[in-house]
Structures are given as structure tokens and as C-alpha cells.
Amino acid sequence: MRGADEQQSQIFSYLSPEARVRKDHPLRAIRAMVDEVLSEMSRQFDAMYASVGRPSIAPEKLLRAQLLQMLYSIRSERLLMEEMDYNLLFRWFVGLNADDAVWDATVFTKNRDRLLEADVAKLFLAQVVEQARGRGLTSDEHFTVDGTLLEAWAGAKSFQPKAEKKTPPPDDDPDHDAGNPTVNFHGEKRSNDTHESKTDPESLLARKGQGKEAKLSYSGHLLVENKNGLIVDAEGLQANGTAERDAALLMLEKLGGTKTVTVGGDKGFDTRGFVAECRHLRVTPHVAQNHARAGGSAIDAHHAARRIQDQPAETEAHRRMFRLAEDDCGAAQSAAPRSWQSGLDLHLRLRRLQPGAHAKLGDRSSGVPAA
């Protein structure tokens, strides 16, 4: 018997969004972990808001919505609000009832910025990492670092000479558009030394490789443990050419502890400065050798002899991505904690703001063993 095509026959529904989500949906496990972390952050949330006034969007709901945006690669907050309006799965995960109104995209963005300014996102990541460590899901010995360019929200037209102030064309010019003026920079030599973006001065012109187009960018970096591939730290720096190695050292120093750890990386990390700083921090660099670099590889033949067969079992997946080189200098190092210097001191040395940015090999005061 054919069913009737009846529409809008019921005004009320007696099923909650919870009942609509199947029991084995992956978001259920994620929601349980997220709620546990958010409950531990309640005091930090209380300190961010005034005790009187109109209630804002709950920070817990903001973070759950941001997490959904990342998990489902939703490209904008406006599209996220549209999805939440009709998607019962999203409503359930964020904590909205089926008849609750979603937020305006602009209001959502402003409230999100408040969380970012208070470093809540970093605190949230730190709590998730601690939760994983408490359950034995992370390795405390073997890590991998990598970075990529993050395109800035600044157009090529905004990249203009630092000292020069161009006079805008007259308003009666038919080719003039005040909101999107015509800029002809073909044949002009532009570099970060002479030019800067007028809308995002901290972004720098960078390219991912030879033959690739240069774009205004930042540099994003991750530190991943090798047991289950979980992200344990993240850094964002200016794309200044050395940011990938600088961020790796900053993240490695935060690991703490006294035993030697290993870190894998691609050819971009095979520099004498990075290898020397890793030995400062009692970190064994397993980086792919770059023999094409001027001066050759920073990993000598003796240290490169022991390779994949000496690596622990949990790095099996990473062996396909990196050509590892073994450095067995850990026995010659002291048992002092890895954070033997403050993060500020390391940051200064990375930026060459004090003498001895990279200590000479064999300098006993630096804790770097002779090669």
C-alpha cells in the first residue's frame, strides 16, 4: 500500500536530539571527553566573565562548536551557524535543544575572539593531552615535528612599500574603486625587507618551495607523539624562513623530564644549529639527511649508521615518512632536566638576541657534547 505524502502534519516532536544520535556514533566518545575537559576548565571560564550583566554565549558551547567546525572542515562561521540550524547532530553535540535559536555569526565570532585572547584554546589542548596521558595513550619518548604555511587573510594588493605613501587617484577617475583599488605591481621587486602588508603587518611573504607562488603567510607547527599520532603541542610563528626549526625547539623544551627523547623530522631540520640545540635539550634528532645543503648534513656518518632497525615499534607508521638517523650521544649528557634554561632564554637564543645563539660543540658550559 502506498503511503500518503503528508507534510508538516505534526507541530511538536517528543524526541530529543540525544535520541536521534545513534549509540555508536564517533561523536559520542568525543563529546564525553570534551565534557570532562570543560568541567575542569570551569574556574578559568568564571574568571573571564563579569558576575553581572547580560549572559553571553556559554564558553563550553563555543568550544564545542569550534571543535565541530574543525572536525567537519566547515569553512566559515556563517556556514557553521547554518549547519547548526538544521543539523540535529550538531545541535546535540553543541548542547542546543531542537527548538533553540542559533546565534548570529557576528556575535559568535566576537565571543570566539574573547576565548582566543584568553588563551583558552591552548588550555583546552593542554587538558586534552593530559587526559590522553592519564589513560596511557601517548608516548613520552618519541615524537615527530612538522610545519606548514598558513595563508594570511591579506591580499597581495596590501603588500606595499614600507616608507612610501601612495596618493589615491581622484574620485572622478572612472577606473578608481575605493574598496578594491587597481594595483599594478608587475615588474616590481618586492621583499619582506622593503614591503609589508597594510592590513596584516605581521604576515610575511613566503613560499612552500622552489617554483611555488609566494603568498602572505604565517607558519603553523605541530608536535606529534608517535604512539597513537596525537598532537601534544602547537605553535604559530611568523614565516621568517627559520620558524619551523625555532618552533620545534620551543615545543621540545616544554616536554620536561630527564630522560632523552627522540624527534623525527624532514630534511628541513638537518642544520647544525638545530642539531646542536636538540643536544642542549637532551633530544636525539632523527632527521632525514640533507646532503645537498651547503656544508653537507649535520648528522655525521657514525650517527647515521644506525637507522630504522633501532627504532621502537610504535614508530612503524612514521618510518615510511621520514629517513631516520640515529644519534647516540645521550650517554654523554648529564641527567639534568630538559628545561635547564627558561623558555625566555631559549626564545632569545633562537632570535639571535644574545651572544652564543647556538653554542659551539664541545663547550662544557653549554652542555653540548663534542661531535
Image (cartoon, rainbow, N blue to C red):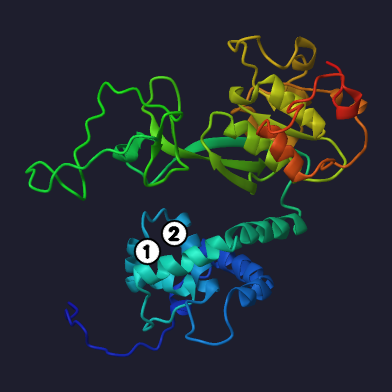
Q: Is residue 87 visible?
A: no
* Residue 6, picture quadrant: bottom left
Q: Amino acid at mark 1?
A: Leu
The image shows residue 331 at horizontal and vertical percentages of 91, 27
Q: Earlier in the sequence, mark 2 or mark 1?
A: 2
Near-viewer residue (93 or 104) = 104
Residue type at mark 2 is Gln
Q: Which residue is mark 1?
A: 80
1 or 59: nearer the viewer: 59
The secondary element bearing badge 1 is classed as helix
User: Crowdedness of circle 2 by 10 Å Cα count: few (<14), some, many (20+)?
Assistant: some
In the image: residue 135, left or right of residue 176:
right
Describe residue 94's horizontal placement relative to residue 321 as left or right.
Answer: left
Q: Residue at x 76, y 40 (%)?
A: 345
Q: Residue at x 87, y 39 (%)?
A: 259
Any mark on residue 110, and which? none
Q: To which residue does mark 2 refer?
A: 69
Residue depicted at 51% across the width and 66% down the height: 114
